[in-house]
Amino acid sequence: MERILTGDRPTGPLHLGHYVGSLRNRVKLQNEYDTFIIVADIQALTTHWENPELIRNNVREVTLDNLAAGLNPEKTSIFVQSMVPQIAELTVLFGLYTTVSRLKHNPTIKTEAKLYGFTDMTYGFLGYPVSQAADILFCRANLIPVGEDQLPHVEVTRFVARRFNELYGDVFPEPKALVSEISRLIGLDGNAKMSKSLGNAIYLKDDPKEIKKKVMSAVTDPARIHKTDPGHPDICTIFAYHKAFNKVEIPEIEDSCKKGTIGCVSCKKNLIKKLEEILSPMRERRAEFDKPGLIEDILIAGTDKAVEAGKETMALVREAMHTNYWKER
Ligand code: TRP
């Protein structure tokens, strides 16, 4: 069976942008692939090193979000990055032949550095794509379901794998990204990206009242003052959400918006109904998993599986790099 590896930084709760970008694919593909989900606490600390307590609290939160979204812990291994030492080992080894200039040209790094106001980047932040390559390659994954902002990191991963194989011998597959049809969701304020730091997100754990409030106050086409004004769906936030969550009704909504026969209020109410169809089963699953000790047990079992895979990979790596001085004792 081929392997999937993907995951999230535990900096806060997951939102609909995560769902559309990657979670939806994870849930669908977990039956066809041996699936590993990483809760990337160390990567989160590359931007939040001054706040380890926040990251610790969100490890549980993000795990619960993944389970609520429909990942089945019997099939899928969810694990904590910092508890798999082979990832740290590989990060050091991959850094041997990955140049600083390759890392400096990474567009996602540039965007994030701006966002966090990093003028003098730390070694760990600039290098986190190398660590992400280790996240993916420690279990020799083949497929990485991600949003499009992650593509530069997947490129680094593919370089790291290819170059390792050239230098030392064939150990790693060159994994491929799987980007969903709609891989980026715009924010409630019309901003290009739904994100926690921009405060424009609908969270998977939001209750029906919050969802209603958020959707009803979302930005629509500013040219539509009266219900009968012709609308411009391509610039409307709500229409973008219909595209992501209500594909079947798209032609109808587009037509009636353009003609001015449907108002924004009823269009929003329709969306809320569609969102509830996705989010209400998530609430039920969340309640099932949100029991004392259960999340911890799931993470421990997933991490044990990850460490097992990491040990197998490290044995091959040590052999290839001639660092197998003696057998593991
Ligand atoms: N960089 C990803 C994000 O910010 C999280 C992540 C860490 C990841 N390691 C990964 C994603 C490995 C895919 C594969 O969302």
Image: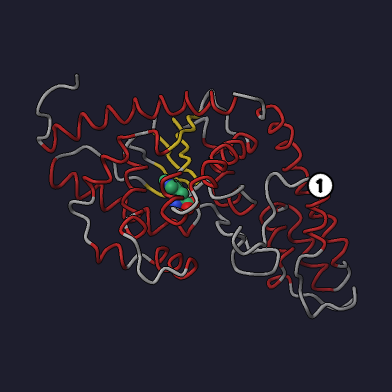
Q: Nearer the viewer, residue 5 or 267?
A: 5
Q: Quadrant of the C terminus?
A: top left
Residue visible at 26% across and 32% down in the picture: 313
Residue visible at 82% across and 54% down in the picture: 212
Farthest top residue in view: 329
> Is ligand 1 within 8 Å of the beta carbon of the residue shown at mark 1?
no
Residue 107, compared with residue 21, is above or below; it is below
Colour scheme in use: secondary structure
Q: Quadrant of the N terminus?
A: top left
Residue 130, compared with residue 4, is above or below; it is below
Q: Position of residue 209 (x, y in %)?
A: 83, 50
Give left or right: position of 16 versus 260: left
Residue identifier under label 1:
208
Give left or right: position of 69 versus 104: right
Q: Give the residue type at disc 1.
A: Pro
Residue 204, compared with residue 328, is above or below; it is below
Q: Is residue 19 visible?
A: yes
Element class at badge 1: helix
Residue 145, compared with residue 139, is above or below; it is below
Count of numbered circles in the view: 1
Give left or right: position of 60 versus 325: right
Residue visible at 76% across and 39% down in the picture: 280
Residue visible at 60% across and 59% down in the picture: 195
Q: Is residue 178 visible?
A: no
| Residue 314 found in image quarter | top left
Q: Position of residue 279 (x, y in %)?
A: 73, 43
Within-10-Å neighbours for mark 1: few <14, some 14–19, many 20+: some
Q: Position of residue 57 (x, y in %)?
A: 57, 41
